[in-house]
Image (spheres, rainbow, N blue to C red):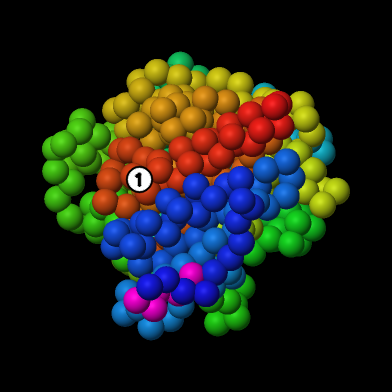
């Protein structure tokens, strides 16, 4: 298939969701995309599975159904799914001190911090500026665990919330390793990706065996690489102040090369996935997919319960968190898009994912042109999400008539 002018695209879309396809293709026609994919599950089956454009900036390598894109922050959704599966199995406990399984973590006032506090971004353990993460640390794991054990909470645990931008995935991964002997990337691959048939990875075992999208630098990545953040919003101003908690918990906590290393496990930012696999994962969080349900109904409901809301000490915005996932309402996960009963993740690189248990929906959008925004949902994702909810409304109205 192809668009006028030779732009490749392919996939399928139920007629009820035709508006999603129109919006997706209009983004290419308007020059807003290089390569992208969007997938929607409704009632446990795929109703939109579209991809188009090119996986490379030179526009010579067509995007494929199997093309993997780096996820940025939505990597944390994969990590949360692994942790909550272990809670359902009784291997992890939401309200037991992490230090019970990881004694070194108790240092510097962290002895009462629980998994629930980490998942709801209330632990206060947000900075690794005393021992910034490097690619070598990722490969060896131990240096990061030691840095986390040596970290001090930036506020009294469970009294406020702030986005655990860098520390989230590593805190959960080390806890999983202590309980299972496997890092979160290995556990996710064996216990979630394999049974569901997902092309989602926290650390690629063989990058040459998959088709990777080449990412253009987003606004967030430019800032992390030393670019001027500007001062359009309070968070950007704080990113430009080396002494600020926002800067210390993000820019100063990582010392990485600009190009991601696909084989390294970066459970906070460095996951890779196709849109269809991400949507399938989210669908399994809230219902059955081909007879497989990832979490118990009670755990799915707990995800959507508000665990933290109000001013975020890191992003300087009002945000809301469930158990490991964003909740409405915030600039990055806005109710205005229709997400009033959803949970999910927005990526600073433009990736957007969510599940909505009330509407039995799951959604994933990935692309490689990068987000031009920082601190709010990308315009393209916003339009696609609105089109999804408009389509669901039309389907419901048709079924009721």
Identity of the residue drawn at 64% across and 64% down: 199
Majority secondary structure in the magenta region: loop
Instruction: State the SS at label 1.
Output: loop
Q: Which residues are magenta?
A: 5-9
Report x, y in % for residue 62: 46, 77
Identity of the residue drawn at 28% across and 34% down: 245
Q: Is residue 335 above or below residue 287?
A: above
* Left or right position of 290 against 241: right
Report x, y in % for residue 181: 73, 54
Does any portion of residue 217 appear in the rendered image? no
Q: Residues within 10 Å of mark 1 (few under 14, many from 20)?
A: many
Q: Is residue 222 magenta?
A: no
Q: Quadrant of residue 154?
A: top left
- Residue ID for mark 1: 378
Report x, y in % for residue 28: 36, 62
Identity of the residue drawn at 60% across and 80% down: 209
Report x, y in % for residue 149: 50, 41
Pick the residue in front: 351 or 166. Answer: 351
């Amino acid at each position: 298939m192809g668009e006028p002018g030779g732009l490749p695209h392919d996939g399928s879309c139920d007629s009820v969701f035709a508006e999603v396809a129109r919006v997706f293709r209009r983004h290419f026609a308007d020059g807003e995309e290089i390569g992208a994919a969007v997938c929607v599950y409704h009632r446990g089956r795929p109703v939109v599975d579209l991809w188009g454009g090119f996986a490379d900036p030179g526009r010579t390598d067509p995007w494929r159904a199997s093309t993997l894109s780096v996820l940025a922050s939505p990597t944390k959704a994969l990590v949360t799914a692994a942790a909550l599966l272990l809670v359902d199995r009784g291997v992890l406990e939401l309200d037991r001190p992490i230090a019970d399984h990881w004694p070194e973590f108790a240092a510097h006032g962290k002895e009462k911090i629980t998994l629930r506090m980490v998942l709801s971004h209330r632990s206060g353990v947000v900075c690794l500026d005393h021992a910034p993460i490097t690619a070598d640390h990722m490969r060896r794991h131990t240096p990061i665990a030691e840095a986390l054990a040596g970290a001090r909470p930036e506020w009294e645990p469970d009294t406020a919330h702030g986005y655990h931008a860098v520390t989230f995935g590593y805190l959960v991964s080390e806890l999983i390793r202590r309980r299972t002997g496997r890092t979160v990337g290995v556990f996710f691959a064996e216990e979630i990706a394999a049974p569901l048939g997902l092309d989602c990875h926290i650390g690629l075992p063989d990058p040459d065996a998959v088709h990777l999208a080449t990412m253009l630098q987003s606004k967030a990545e430019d800032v992390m690489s030393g670019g001027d953040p500007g001062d359009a919003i309070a968070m950007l101003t704080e990113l430009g102040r080396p002494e600020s908690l926002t800067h210390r918990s993000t820019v100063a906590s990582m010392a990485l090369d600009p190009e991601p290393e696909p084989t390294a496990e970066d459970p906070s930012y460095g996951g890779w996935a196709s849109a269809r696999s991400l949507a399938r994962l989210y669908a399994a969080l809230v219902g059955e997919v081909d007879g497989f349900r990832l979490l118990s109904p009670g755990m799915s409901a707990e995800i959507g319960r508000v665990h933290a809301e109000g001013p975020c000490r890191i992003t300087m915005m009002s945000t809301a968190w469930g158990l490991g996932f964003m909740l409405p309402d915030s600039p990055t996960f806005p109710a205005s898009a229709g997400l009033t009963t959803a949970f999910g993740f927005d990526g600073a690189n433009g990736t957007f994912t969510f599940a909505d248990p009330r509407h039995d929906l799951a959604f994933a959008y990935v692309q490689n042109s990068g987000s031009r925004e920082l601190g709010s949902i990308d315009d393209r994702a916003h339009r696609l999400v609105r089109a999804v909810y408009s389509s669901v409304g039309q389907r419901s109205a048709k079924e009721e008539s």
